[in-house]
Image (cartoon, rainbow, N blue to C red):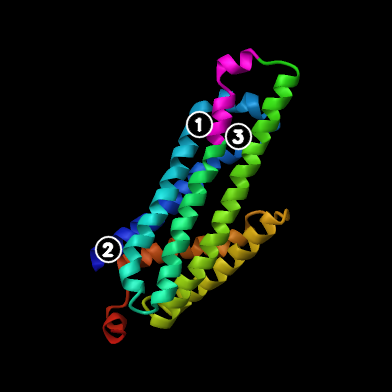
């Protein structure tokens, strides 16, 4: 059990770290006005950011698989909901990564050199659509993540597998994430401020799991 908890903690940190660094590399490129030119000049950076976000998408499935046997002891339906949400999140994140690949394909030197005038406008439109699809799918992934993680935090709160104050931070954090992703899908971007409580939870929880793990006395009494 302790080995599993430590691995889950490491995967949480790996997922969070890979996403933060990967999006930190990709976002400035995808937000430039000279999108096609900047992508071509930052091809290696885009590949690096893309790969890190792929690691995040894979890690979240590992987290769900490892936590499922423990969580279902306390609330089988909610545990399945959390597992399903993380699988859906991973699928949406992987789909969102098609957008940057499309941009890289549009910026092959041979393609760029042979297109001008209306062709440039067409490629620019495709590039903009790829970016919009990337962020829409990401927001949908965060919506699914927030819903599933509210179930996860509810299980943690009721079971006392971790201190209840930590579960409350998670409930607040994922409620904020749900609001942020819903507003973003509706076209109202409030920035990253609503991501902060959830980010705190996703840093403190894995550290807790690595250092202390789930409460063993609670696990015994809940059987």
Residue found at x 49% / y 42%: 22
- Quadrant of the image for the C terminus? bottom left
Q: Quadrant of residue 34?
A: top right
- How far across and how far down the image is residue 112, in percent? 62, 17
Which residue corresponds to mark 1?
45
Q: Is residue 120 above or below residue 23?
A: above
Q: Is residue 212 visible?
A: no
In this view, the residue farthest toward the right is 118
Q: Assign a secondary structure to mark 2.
A: helix
**Sequence order check: which comes first, mark 2 or mark 1?**
2
**Sequence order check: which comes first, mark 3 or mark 1?**
3
Residue 106 lies within the magenta run: yes
Residue 27 lies within the magenta run: no
- How far across and how far down the image is residue 159, in percent? 39, 81
Neighbours of disc 3 within 10 Å: few (<14), some (14-19), many (20+): many
Query: Do residues under tags 2 and 1 come within 8 Å of each other at their CB atoms?
Result: no
Which residue corresponds to mark 3?
29
Using the numbered discs, state the Cα–Cα distance from disc 2 to disc 1 in whole angstroms: 34 Å
Q: Which range is magenta? A: 100-114
Residue found at x 50% / y 48%: 93
Query: Do residues under tags 3 and 1 come within 8 Å of each other at their CB atoms?
Result: yes
Magenta highlight: main SS: helix
Q: Assign a secondary structure to mark 1.
A: helix
Q: Quadrant of residue 55?
A: top left
- How far across and how far down the image is residue 57, in percent? 44, 49
Which residue corresponds to mark 2?
4
Using the numbered discs, state the Cα–Cα distance from disc 3 to disc 1 in whole angstroms: 9 Å
In depth, the one of 213 and 110 nearer the eye is 110
């Amino acid at each position: 059990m302790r080995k599993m908890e430590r691995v889950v903690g490491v995967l949480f940190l790996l997922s969070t770290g890979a996403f933060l660094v990967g999006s930190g590399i990709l976002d400035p490129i995808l937000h430039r006005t000279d999108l096609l030119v900047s992508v071509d000049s930052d091809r290696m950076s885009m590949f690096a950011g893309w790969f890190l976000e792929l690691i995040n998408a894979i890690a979240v499935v590992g987290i769900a698989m490892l936590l499922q046997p423990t969580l279902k002891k306390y609330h089988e339906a909610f545990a399945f909901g959390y597992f399903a949400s993380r699988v859906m999140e991973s699928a949406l994140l992987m789909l969102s990564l098609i957008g940057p690949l499309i941009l890289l394909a549009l910026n092959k030197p041979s393609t760029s050199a042979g297109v001008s005038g209306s062709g440039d406008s067409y490629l620019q439109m495709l590039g903009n659509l790829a970016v919009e699809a990337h962020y829409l799918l990401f927001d949908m992934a965060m919506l699914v993540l927030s819903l599933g993680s509210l179930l996860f935090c509810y299980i943690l709160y009721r079971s006392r597998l971790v201190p209840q104050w930590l579960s409350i931070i998670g409930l607040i954090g994922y409620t904020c994430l749900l609001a942020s992703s819903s507003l973003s899908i509706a076209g109202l971007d409030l920035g990253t401020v609503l991501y902060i409580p959830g980010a705190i939870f996703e840093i403190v929880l894995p550290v807790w799991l690595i250092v202390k793990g789930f409460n063993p006395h609670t696990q015994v009494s809940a059987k």
